[in-house]
Image (cartoon, rainbow, N blue to C red):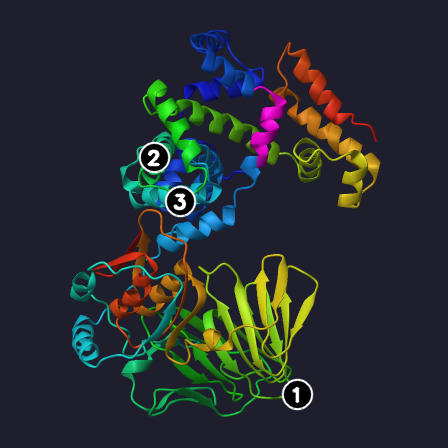
Amino acid sequence: MVSRISFLIVKHNQSALADDEQFELDNWISQSEENQRLFFELTDPDHIKAHLKQLQAYDEQSVRTTIEAQFANAFKGETKIKRIWFRVAAAAAVIAFFGSGVYFYWSFEHHKSLTEQKNQLARQDVAAPIKNRATITLANGQKIFLDSVRTGTIATQKNVRINKNSSGAIVYSGNTQPKTELTYNVLTNPRGSRVIDITLNDGTRVWLNAASSLRYPVSFLKEKRNVEITGEAYFEVAHDASRPFSVSKGYTNVEVLGTHFNVNAYEDEPNIKVTLLEGSIKLRNENLSSEEILKPGEQGIVKEHQIEIAKSVNIEEVMAWKNGLFKFDHTDLKVIMREMARWYDVEVSYEGNIPEELYNGDVPRTANASAVLKVLQYTGANFTIERNKIIVRP
Amino acid sequence: MSIYIDDNDLFNAFKKGEPKASEKIFSDHFRELCFFAERLSGSKETAEDLVADSFVKMLQRKESFENLQNIKAFLFVTTRNACINSFKAGQRHANAHRQMHYLLKSDAGKAGLFEDEIIRAEVINAIYTEVENLPDRAKTVFKLIFTEGLSNEEIARQLGIEIQTVRSQKARALQLLRTTLLKKGNIIALIYLVSCFSAPN
């Protein structure tokens, strides 16, 4: 304990004080009326009851999330990921985008006068990713860097060909159904990378956002089709009544026959959100014994011990990432900053008490970070960019 | 329960970057810090935010600490300073006015250290931890009696268990906690607590 007196009082409550400690405590008590009152309070059941209630009310998960938003590896240990940062390409992009007049549309909840931060933002600006930096890890551990291979066949696994087409999309073809073991590939899309489009062996098409990954079999089994994700992905599942398709992340499982849906499962977002656009899906939380069936337009929010259904969500907002936009609809600033952090591959830190405002707005994802921040400044927060960090101040 | 033998063990693991260690330091102390911060700032939301900031600041300079005691002291001092600063910067919370008088008054008496608030937070947290370490059933029953003030019947109903089970869990909790909340020779506290535990059914 920080305070010696706390230690003594706790021991006192346990009837475990040694003579000299008792003497020390008595001395402190007799030093002032305030000390006497404090001692009584901390040994009085009524006061203790009230204080315990207050202590219980603090939201551990919310505080943990706030910490992780500002310090990415706070409770995850330190894994050094090697990043290849194309500085030259980024500098060229800054000039191009600045010159080309980007269109915005926005509305805001509160209007305050802008402070002169434009110059500072421009000087250290961060450009939007201009290429896709995804990789596919084959079953034998070999990694293919998708932006550095040519179009055409990039690999063959058993009887399945992996093809990259002229628009950069990946397609697996060759419909063999294995009877024994499955071979898995992992598609990884790092932070600061554009959306990657992949078509799996059964014809299911998946779009993967930045800071996300997809683990899937090269060829699906005869009875079922299972994949795992981290981060965010949009699925257009090929219809096949004989083989249900399922996506899992931890204890969350989405089962479909053929349908279009979005899964947002970033570790640093509070809950997993599954939004159905077309068709029908069954959403399961492995911690519970119940399942929920979603209808188009509905969103399932998966928490540790429950599933909540939001009856009608703003589909455009959910799908904005795939359509090349940042779209905010009464969105909290911290949620926005987390999205920016993944897209621009920057860290975000907060200093001081940030006003709790909600934001509305549409900004194309091709814009530089400073352009997006300029829009956000209208609501009272101040931003500076330093190297690869965005600092948010009140 | 804890995988760390003592403070040194925990501290070394933390220094090495073991995620479970920083997790443990966080869960051991964030409540007492929030309690401390809420007493100084008057707001639960502000308290949680400032405490999160203090943890972040601590993590950012983890190399500079020599032992767990340093870390705890840093967390309290940082939280205290943040409360005072955000206060001076002008808060929009309704409680701010009332808190200002409190802070100014204590400020004069304790040279702005707020040691009494630290003591309050640490002692209550120690009791809280003691309750949290009770076995599950006994803990649930004890909390429902002590903090919610429910009767045996209400508890039995809420938990879907037999009243006899409620009574035996009560007895178990009381036995395990007897030495921490009771004081030798304080008959008033003893009577009060016994009456809590034998509320009319």
- How packed mark 2 is, by other alpha carbons closer than 10 Å (few <14, some 14-19, many 20 or more), is some
The residue wearing badge 3 is B92
The residue wearing badge 1 is A241
Residues drawn in magenta: A42-53
Q: Could you tell me residue A256's position as x and y percent?
A: 62, 79
> Is residue B40 visible in this depiction of the protein?
no
Q: Could you tell me residue A355's position as x and y percent?
A: 37, 52
The local secondary structure at tag 3 comes to loop
- How packed mark 3 is, by other alpha carbons closer than 10 Å (few <14, some 14-19, many 20 or more), is few
Q: Earlier in the sequence, mark 2 or mark 3?
A: 2
Report the amino acid beneath label 3: Arg
In the image: residue A133, left or right of residue A57 = left
On whether disc 2 and disc 3 are found on a single subunit, the reply is yes
Q: Which mark is residue B84?
A: 2
Magenta span contains residue A56: no
Whole-number angstrom distance, CA of label 1 to CA of label 2: 64 Å
Q: Report the chain holding disc 2.
A: B
Residue occupying the point 64% across, 82% down: A223
Magenta span contains residue A43: yes
Report the amino acid beneath label 2: Ile
Give the total of numbered labels: 3
Q: Which mark is residue A362?
A: none
Look at discs 2 and 3 and give the one toward the viewer: 3
Q: Report the chain holding disc 3.
A: B
Q: Where is residue A164, by image quadrant? A: bottom left
Q: Where is residue B147, by image quadrant? A: top right
Residue occupying the point 52% across, 89% down: A203
Q: Could you tell me residue A178's position as x and y percent?
A: 57, 85
Report the amino acid beneath label 1: Ala
Foreground pick, A359 / A340: A359
Residue occupying the point 31% across, 66% down: A345
> Is residue A373 visible in this depiction of the protein?
yes
